[in-house]
Image (spheres, rainbow, N blue to C red):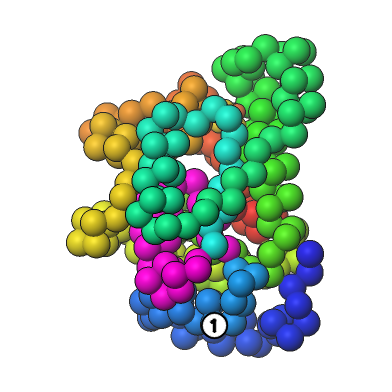
Amino acid sequence: MTTTVSKQMSDQELATLNERFESASPQEIVRWTDGRFGSELVLMSSFGLEDVAVFDMFWRINPRARVMTLDTLRLPTETYTLMDRIKARYETEIEAFTPDMDSVQEMVRKEGYNLFYKSIENRKLCCGIRKVEPLNRALNSVDAWITGLRRDQGMARGEIKIVERDEAHGNYKISPLANWDFDQVRAYVDENSVPYNELHDKGYPSIGCLPCTRAIEPGEDLRAGRWWWELDPDAKECGLHVVEKATR
Ligand code: SF4
């Protein structure tokens, strides 16, 4: 889907917005985004601490706020429990995108259930089938999407703009928390009693699929628990957050 012509922005408009939003609160950014894109706006969420904080902000601005997620079918029980709590607390539906099952079955038949531990290529294959393809399917259906990305999460995330044109999906990607740090997110969640994943209290600052996430030790990088067996930190993205592709 290409963003409706009336909602498209010129390079100049994007630059002006980004300059203005550098000193704006996340709520101001979400409010502007909701006004601009309306029902064609979604939050793409993996229900991490940032995502639940942004969803709470979004919902307070628009009780019909839409939220999409990728259900890889390998998520921790705690994440599914949180999704049920979010649905109940906000009386909302979660638009969940699952992988193409023919592709999953073929991958498992050829490489095994836990193929990701064998090589980076296998891990990227699994992320491609369980995350990237469903993500593309989801995002191709909307004009704009909100993420919970923060710049200080490192790697490609340090380069994100608050409002970006997402060339891969023909729409716009908005990151209201780009300038926040982890402590600000945590404080927002606590102050507003936002439901969050109980794994965060067990040493998991970043939560993905069950077999690919572990708790971290004090002093470790916040994403050290993701694909912890891989030694190359630059490889620790699943293709979702690569800036060049403007995907999540
Ligand atoms: S995080 Fe692990 S289980 Fe989940 S899609 Fe990627 S490789 Fe597969």
Residue 51 drawn in magenta: yes
Which of 78 and 113 lies nearest the eye of the viewer?
Answer: 78
Q: How many marks?
A: 1
Residue 198 image point, x, y percent: 29, 37
- Drawn side of residue 151 relative to residue 242, left or right: left
- Drawn side of residue 69 relative to residue 205, left or right: right
Q: Identify the residue shown where x is 39% and y is 26%.
A: 214
Q: Is residue 2 visible?
A: yes
Per the image, label 1 sits on a secondary structure element best described as: helix
Residue 18 image point, x, y percent: 52, 79
Q: Identify the residue shown where x is 61% and y is 72%.
A: 39
Q: Residue furthest left?
A: 191
Q: Which residue is mark 1?
A: 35
Q: Identify the residue shown where x is 78% and y is 69%.
A: 2
Ligand 1's image quarter is top right
Q: Which residues are magenta?
A: 42-65
Which of 58 and 233 lies nearest the eye of the viewer?
Answer: 58
Q: Identify the residue shown where x is 78% and y is 82%.
A: 5
Residue 70 drawn in magenta: no
Q: Is residue 152 visible?
A: no
Q: Quadrant of residue 104?
A: top right
Against 229, residue 207 (above or below) is: below
Residue 191 image point, x, y percent: 20, 61
Q: Quadrant of residue 220?
A: top left
Callout 1 environment at 10 Å: few (<14), some (14 to 19), or many (20+)?
few
- Drawn side of residue 138 relative to residue 201, left or right: right
Against 28, residue 191 (above or below) is: above
Residue type indicated by callout 1: Gly
- Drawn side of residue 74 relative to residue 113, left or right: left
Say if disc 1 is inside 8 Å of ligand 1.
no
Residue 166 image point, x, y percent: 69, 64
